[in-house]
């Protein structure tokens, strides 16, 4: 599995890697913007520079991934490329994945973490590079409006700033995941019953025949957060912070939700044997 962090604030990267290591990788030019840049290069060292940007064997609890971390330079790279590449401005990530495949690095799954649609370039770039897209929203009014806006903008006539996904492709390749559902009350009841029109999502679900994961993420369940011991081993947590950093126990309920969602994702992707 390869994880790619396309958030210039490097949220996923910070979760998986120590801050000192991220700073060192940025200094060595081994983060996502440098990989994207190398993928366009034709010089002899380009392939090695792409390889160098893949941090292998990153362990998170008992699972290991390969990771291409992000950095603030990603914003500068996309700012330049958005104008330099013209209609191909949304292609850098897909170009990188093609380059990685050409190196013989064949991953079963590539997971791309993207920031919300308030900065459309990142969403459009990741959609271009992806076969399947999980759209995360919440039942809050503003987030619902943003989700509606994003989906409508992604569908259309094409061209930079216009639609990039065919309407008939949405039902196959997009799926909604509802996050931060209140533990009690009428909003939770609407989510449980799938009353999407009352929540404001009915229009895009019906128009584009979008599916919604049956599993939703409650607002107050604990998930995997590195404990004090993990962070101390990374050199991030001084001893005096130990009590404050042990918020982290994975709850039984949280584990059930992760297992349920994983099962749905595996079935959606057709990976179940």
Image: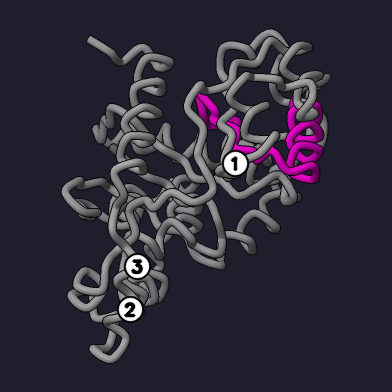
Which image quarter: residue 241?
A: bottom left
Is 222 a magenta residue?
A: no
Question: Which residue position is annotated with label 3?
Answer: 247
The disc placed on residue 20 is 2
Q: Earlier in the sequence, mark 2 or mark 3?
A: 2
Residue range of the region highlighted in magenta in the rendering: 127-154
Residue projecting furthest to the front: 185
Question: In what element is the residue under mark 1?
Answer: loop
Horizontal side of 65 relative to 10 (left or right) equals: left
What secondary structure is the stretch in magenta mostly built from?
helix
79 is higher (above) or lower (below) than 185 = below
For the C terminus, give its image quadrant: top left
Residue 271, percent across and down?
31, 15
Q: Earlier in the sequence, mark 3 or mark 1?
A: 1
Mark 2 to mark 3: distance in Å?
23 Å
Identified at 79% across, 25% down, the residue is: 198
x and y percentages locating residue 142 in the rendered image:
79, 45
User: What residue is at 60 percent from the left and 44 percent from the top?
Assistant: 182
Instruction: Kindly report which numbered mark, 2 or 3, lies closer to the viewer in this rendering.
Output: 3
Please tell me which residue lies in front, 47 or 109: 109
The residue that disc 1 covers is: 184
Instruction: Decide: few, some or many residues near mark 3? Use Cα within 10 Å; few <14, some 14-19, many ≥20.
Output: few
Whichever of labels 1 and 2 marks the residue nearer the N terminus, that label is 2
Seen from the viewer's position, the closer of residues 65 and 78 is 65
Secondary structure at numbered mark 2: helix
Marks 3/1: CA distance?
Answer: 23 Å
**Where 165 sits versus 161, above or below?**
above
Could you give the CA–CA distance between mark 1 and mark 2, rounded to whole angstroms?
A: 41 Å
Horizontal side, residue 157 vs residue 17: left or right: right
Which residue is drawn at the image coordinates 63% and 29% (left, top)? Answer: 189
């Amino acid at each position: 599995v390869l994880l790619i962090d396309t958030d210039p604030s490097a949220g996923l990267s910070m979760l998986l890697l120590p801050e000192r290591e991220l700073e060192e990788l940025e200094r060595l030019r081994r983060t996502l913007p440098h990989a994207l840049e190398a993928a366009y290069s034709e010089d002899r060292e380009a392939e090695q520079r792409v390889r160098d940007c893949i941090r292998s064997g990153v362990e998170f609890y008992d699972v290991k991934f390969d990771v291409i971390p992000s950095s603030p330079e990603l914003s500068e790279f996309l700012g330049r490329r958005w104008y330099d590449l013209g209609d191909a401005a949304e292609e850098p990530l897909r170009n990188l994945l093609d380059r990685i495949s050409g190196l013989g690095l064949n991953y079963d799954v590539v997971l791309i973490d993207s920031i919300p649609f308030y900065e459309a370039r990142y969403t459009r770039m990741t959609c271009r590079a992806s076969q399947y897209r999980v759209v995360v929203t919440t039942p809050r009014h503003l987030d619902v409006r943003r989700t509606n806006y994003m989906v409508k903008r992604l569908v259309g006539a094409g061209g930079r700033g216009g639609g990039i996904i065919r309407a008939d492709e949405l039902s196959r390749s997009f799926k909604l995941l509802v996050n931060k559902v209140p533990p009690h009350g009428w909003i939770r009841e609407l989510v449980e019953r799938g009353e999407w029109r009352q929540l404001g999502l009915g229009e895009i679900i019906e128009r584009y025949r979008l599916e919604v994961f049956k599993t939703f993420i409650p607002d107050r369940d604990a998930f995997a957060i590195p404990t004090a011991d993990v962070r101390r081993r990374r050199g991030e947590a001084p001893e005096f912070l130990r009590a404050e950093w042990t918020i982290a126990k994975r709850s039984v309920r949280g584990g059930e939700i992760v297992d349920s969602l994983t099962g749905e994702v595996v079935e959606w992707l057709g990976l179940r044997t």
